[in-house]
């Protein structure tokens, strides 16, 4: 029966057969609903998708800086509001740089940026133990491949990375109850600043 439903739903994506019935909104929600209820969809991925849909996950930085600017702080407050509403979830912060400067320097700069974000989120009431796998990707994953200064490459990205194993809901396997919990916004805080040095990004 499930195979038949899957085929039927997949058919709704067909440009000729599905467009009048589907209008672009039926197939994916139905398929996701089936996957949620059959346990085929990874709930970490589901919560990560929700986080990315409801909150800006990326902030950017000035050249050769790990200082959080006002716009970045505003975005991080939104992230903190979301994170506090899901105490069973863990989050990772990935630091990036542009391609100016040495790879080793940019690795350290990316780490300073990630640490500045973590420090700010902690100042907003997120427990530090939930901000795991602090990672610097340095200059290795640019959004735009240019040797010139590029602000969009000078960023951190916050992502859902897993669940807190000691949480009662996680222990009971009630991931759906976590993922579908209502989300209410909050406020607060101050940030961190990394050091700069000559020759870096």
Image (cartoon, rainbow, N blue to C red):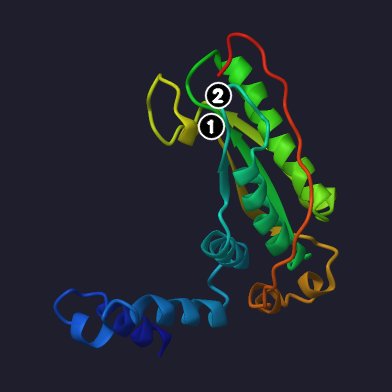
> Looking at the image, is 65 positioned above or below residue 122?
above
Query: In the image, what residue occupies the spot 68% across and 31% down?
Result: 67
How packed is label 1: few (under 14 Cα within 10 Å), some, or many (20 or more)? many
Q: Residue at x 73, y 67 (%)?
A: 86
* Quadrant location of the C terminus in the rendered image: top right
Residue where numbered disc 1 is placed: 154
Position of residue 154 measured from the top left corner of the image (x, y, whole percent)? 53, 32
Whether residues under marks 1 and 2 lie with C-beta atoms below 8 angstroms apart, the answer is yes
Q: Quarter of the image for the N terminus: give it.
A: bottom left
Query: Residue reaching furthest top?
Result: 198
On the rendered structure, is 32 left or right of 171? left
Q: Residue furthest left?
A: 16
Q: Nearer the viewer, residue 61 or 126?
A: 61
Residue under the image location 66 percent in, 43 percent down: 93
Q: Residue at x 46, y 76 (%)?
A: 32
- Name the residue at the front extreme: 70
Q: Which residue is mark 2?
A: 63
Eye-nearest disc, 1 or 2: 2
Of the pair 7 and 65, the residue shown nearer to us: 65
Numbered disc 2: secondary structure: loop
Q: Which mark is residue 74?
A: none
- Give percent across and percent down for residue 169: 79, 74
Q: Where residue 6 sits: x, y (%)?
A: 36, 81
> Would residue 40 appear left or right of 123 to someone viewing this image?
left
Give the distance between the C-alpha atoms of the residues marked 1 and 2, in whole angstroms. Answer: 7 Å
Mark positioned earlier in the residue sequence (1 or 2): 2
Local secondary structure at mark 1: loop
Q: Residues within 10 Å of mark 2 (few under 14, many from 20)?
A: some
Of residues 188 and 120, the one drawn nearer to the viewer in this rendering: 188
């Amino acid at each position: 029966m499930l195979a038949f439903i899957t085929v039927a739903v997949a058919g709704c994506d067909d440009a000729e057969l599905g467009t009048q019935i589907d209008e672009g909104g039926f197939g994916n929600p139905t398929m996701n609903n089936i996957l949620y209820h059959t346990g085929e969809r990874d709930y970490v991925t589901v919560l990560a998708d929700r986080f990315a849909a409801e909150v800006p996950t990326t902030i950017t930085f000035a050249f050769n800086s790990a200082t959080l600017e006002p716009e970045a702080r505003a975005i991080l407050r939104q992230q903190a509001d979301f994170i506090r509403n899901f105490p069973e979830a863990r989050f990772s912060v990935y630091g990036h740089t542009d391609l100016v400067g040495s790879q080793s320097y940019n690795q350290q700069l990316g780490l300073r940026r990630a640490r500045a974000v973590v420090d700010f989120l902690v100042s907003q009431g997120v427990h530090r133990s939930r901000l795991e796998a602090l990672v610097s990707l340095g200059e290795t994953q640019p959004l735009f491949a240019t040797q010139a200064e590029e602000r969009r490459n000078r960023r951190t990205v916050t992502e859902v990375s897993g669940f807190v194993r000691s949480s009662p809901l996680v222990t009971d396997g009630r991931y759906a109850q976590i993922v579908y919990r209502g989300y209410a916004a909050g406020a607060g805080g101050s940030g961190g600043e990394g050091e700069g040095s000559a020759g870096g990004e």
